[in-house]
């Protein structure tokens, strides 16, 4: 009985150990290594055949050189900052676009809600890569957007949207919008309509009732949505490289280039570890608010 | 000083009988339709200041719609609603001197009890420094002083109900609407709260309109009751008159327990009626109800507690029938005997068990006599 139960509880821990902690340990070890022309392209490698002296020798060769290097080259902290800024702005944009959509869905007639929910989830049925690629067709100089704007006579010359931060914002907001909409919708949908009637009855206008009642009560959904957009957006690699061109500096792209173009695995690993540390802070905050909400609900 | 006040018995509160009084609320030919469905059908109603007025009826009878029209959440399809002689058409809920206590209480979960009560005051033209005093007054009135800092999810159902009441009363509205206010409370707490409500209504001298499907609740708290069915108001009267002189079989049947016997009515010159109800059975003599016509199909209605049960044939009564006890419902304080009459009809008779462990007078299958006076029951058309 207790053995069976322990095994059951053990499965997720085993999962985390194998698929998170072990790879993390490997990456961390590589980040402490030095680059070399070999396969694998770093040194030292652990050779257990030499016994204890071998292990001691191996540990002596590990150092934080690569982390020091990251602080010396302005490229890296600029990339981190730029990623933070792009993720932050994208999250705000996604909130501004997503909130009204979630609100509209929650206010729609109940028989329409499953359909609207379906429409939000539907893009996931197509590959993420294809959807981002499709945006090139829309945003490029000869793309549908420019053609349309020229056709209605709003602009004479095509706009340069591709390969600018704007295109990256469009891509990120588009891709992560459902993660913003769904948690907000969930909080709005279970809100009691009589709360708004009560606010109106006590002298609020409809607009102020929204700001005083609806908005604060959907706070847990807003926080969840923001984290769900912010966390993947900061490490985003595909969208900036496909839509952002060379002009957009993001840490995900830097990481990719270190790893594949420079074949500098140790520096790439150090970049990844720092990124993880940056993300751990919002993730812990996210967990904290989740716990607090659960306590409040209980 | 106080004894003088106590000695002077106040005149009976009955503004509806006083032609000099003008009603606070007037419904004039009000109809409300939702698509094809008529929720409220041509209602005329007058409610006076300081009344505790109950709208009573089964679910779907239109009572809640009628109340929501007073609050401003629904507008009448036809007709006119006035509050204090002001036509309410087009006036939104936030500009009416009407507050509502919601069935779900609708307390704001993110605000403390104090802030919930202050909510309406902060949105009124009350001076900022006056608000804490008023909130404190409301907390005292509803005995919630200790819970002012708690959030709604940290207090009990009964306390939440009182917060909802305090919040609705804080702005001292002309009219307070209560939508099934005690529905979520258990039976004991509900009874206790009914008296609290009456107390608070008296203290604040506010006009209360309560919606309920619980006839006991309506009878307990209300000065007058409007019984509704299918969007129409069937009868408006004091609880005692609703119970003792219902104007229709529907009202008699809806309020309390009743025996119904159908038959043909013959009006007698002395104001009584003879009802022929079964072949060979003696005719029932009873008081004529409103609008009864001679020779019409009619129903005799009598409350079980007005039917006497005895082993011997009672002397000196016109209405006497013999039957056999079919069922006994012992409720502790009273017993209800279901007596089968020769025609197969069941008639209920109630006795009060005013002696502890007395020998039960009757048991199953006993032959008994049922009797009642000429004025104990009513004959109503239909």
Image: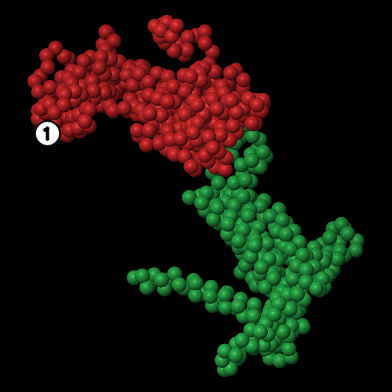
Chain colours: A green, B red
**The N terminus of chain A lies in quadrant:** bottom left
Residue A26, horizontal then vertical, whole percent: 62, 80
**Could you say which quadrant of the image residue A177 lies in?**
bottom right
Q: Is residue A117 visible?
A: no
Instruction: Give above or below for B105 relative to A93.
Output: above
So how many labels did they put on this image? 1
Q: Given the image, what chain letter belongs to the residue carrying mark 1?
A: B
Residue B169, horizontal then vertical, whole percent: 54, 27
Determine whether, in the image, residue B292 is placed left or right of residue A44. Answer: left
Q: Residue furthest toward the right?
A: A156
**Could you say which quadrant of the image residue B245 lies in?**
top left
Q: Secondary structure at mark 1?
A: loop
Read off the residue under disc 1: B364
Determine whether, in the image, residue B23 is placed left or right of residue B54. Answer: right
Residue drawn at the location 25% of the way across and 17% of the way down: B376
In-front residue for pair B105/B351: B105
Residue drawn at the location 49% of the way across and 72% of the way down: A13
């Amino acid at each position: 009985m207790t053995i069976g139960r322990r095994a059951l509880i053990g499965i997720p821990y085993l999962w985390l150990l194998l698929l998170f902690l072990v790879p993390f340990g490997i990456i961390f070890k590589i980040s402490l290594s030095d680059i070399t022309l070999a396969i694998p392209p770093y040194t030292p490698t652990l050779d257990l055949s030499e016994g204890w002296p071998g292990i001691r020798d191996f540990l002596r060769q590990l150092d934080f050189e690569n982390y020091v290097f990251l602080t010396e080259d302005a490229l890296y902290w600029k990339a981190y900052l730029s990623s933070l800024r792009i993720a932050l702005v994208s999250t705000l944009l996604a909130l501004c676009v997503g909130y009204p959509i979630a609100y509209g869905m929650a206010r729609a007639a109940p028989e329409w809600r499953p359909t609207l929910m379906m429409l939000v989830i539907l893009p996931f049925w197509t590959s993420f890569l294809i959807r981002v690629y499709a945006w090139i067709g829309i945003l490029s100089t000869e793309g549908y957007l420019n053609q349309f704007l020229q056709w209605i006579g709003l602009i004479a010359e095509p706009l340069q949207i591709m390969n600018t931060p704007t295109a990256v914002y469009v891509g990120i907001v588009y891709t992560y919008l459902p993660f913003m909409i769904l948690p907000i919708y969930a909080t709005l949908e279970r809100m009691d309509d009589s709360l708004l009637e009560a606010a109106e009855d006590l002298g609020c206008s409809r607009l102020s009732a929204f700001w005083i009642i609806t908005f604060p009560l959907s706070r847990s959904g807003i926080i969840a949505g923001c984290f769900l957009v912010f966390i993947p957006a900061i490490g985003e690699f595909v969208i900036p490289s496909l839509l952002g061109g060379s002009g957009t500096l993001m840490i995900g792209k830097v990481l990719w280039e270190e790893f594949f173009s420079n074949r500098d695995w140790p520096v790439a690993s150090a970049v990844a570890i720092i990124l993880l540390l940056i993300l751990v802070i919002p993730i812990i905050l996210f967990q904290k608010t989740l716990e607090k909400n659960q306590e409040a609900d209980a | 000083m106080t004894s003088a006040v106590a000695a002077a018995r106040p005149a009976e509160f009955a503004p509806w009988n006083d032609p000099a009084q003008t009603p606070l609320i007037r419904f004039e030919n009000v109809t409300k339709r939702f698509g094809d469905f008529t929720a409220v059908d041509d209602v005329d109603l007058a409610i006076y200041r300081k009344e505790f007025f109950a709208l009573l009826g089964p679910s779907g009878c239109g009572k809640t719609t009628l109340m929501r029209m007073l609050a401003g959440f629904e507008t009448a399809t036809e007709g006119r609603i006035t509050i204090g002689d002001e036509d309410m058409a087009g006036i939104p809920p936030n500009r009416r001197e009407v507050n509502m206590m919601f069935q779900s209480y609708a307390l704001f979960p993110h605000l403390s009890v104090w802030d919930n009560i202050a909510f309406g005051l902060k949105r009124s033209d009350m001076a900022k420094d006056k608000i804490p005093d008023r909130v404190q007054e409301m907390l005292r009135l509803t005995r919630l002083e200790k819970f002012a800092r708690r959030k709604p999810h940290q207090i009990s159902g009964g306390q939440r109900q009182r917060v909802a009441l305090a919040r609705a009363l804080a702005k001292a509205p002309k009219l307070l609407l209560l939508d099934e206010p005690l529905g979520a409370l258990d039976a004991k707490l509900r009874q206790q709260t009914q008296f609290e409500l009456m107390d608070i209504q008296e203290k604040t001298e506010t006009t209360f309109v309560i919606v309920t499907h619980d006839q006991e609740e309506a009878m307990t708290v209300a000065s007058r009751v409007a019984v509704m069915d299918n969007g129409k108001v069937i009868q408006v009267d004091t609880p005692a008159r609703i119970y003792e002189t219902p104007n229709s079989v529907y009202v008699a049947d809806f309020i309390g327990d009743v025996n119904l016997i159908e038959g043909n009515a013959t009006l007698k010159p002395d104001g009584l009626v003879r009802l022929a109800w079964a072949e060979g059975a003696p005719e029932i003599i009873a008081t004529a109800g409103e609008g009864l016509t001679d020779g019409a199909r009619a129903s005799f209605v009598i409350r079980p507690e007005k039917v006497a049960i005895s082993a011997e044939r009672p002397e000196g009564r016109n209405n006497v029938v013999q039957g056999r006890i079919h069922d006994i419902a012992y409720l502790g304080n009273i017993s209800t005997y279901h007596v089968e009459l020769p025609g197969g009809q069941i008639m209920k008779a109630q006795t009060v068990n005013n002696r502890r462990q007395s020998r039960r007078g009757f048991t199953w299958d006993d032959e008994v006599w049922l009797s009642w006076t000429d004025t104990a029951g009513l004959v109503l058309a239909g």
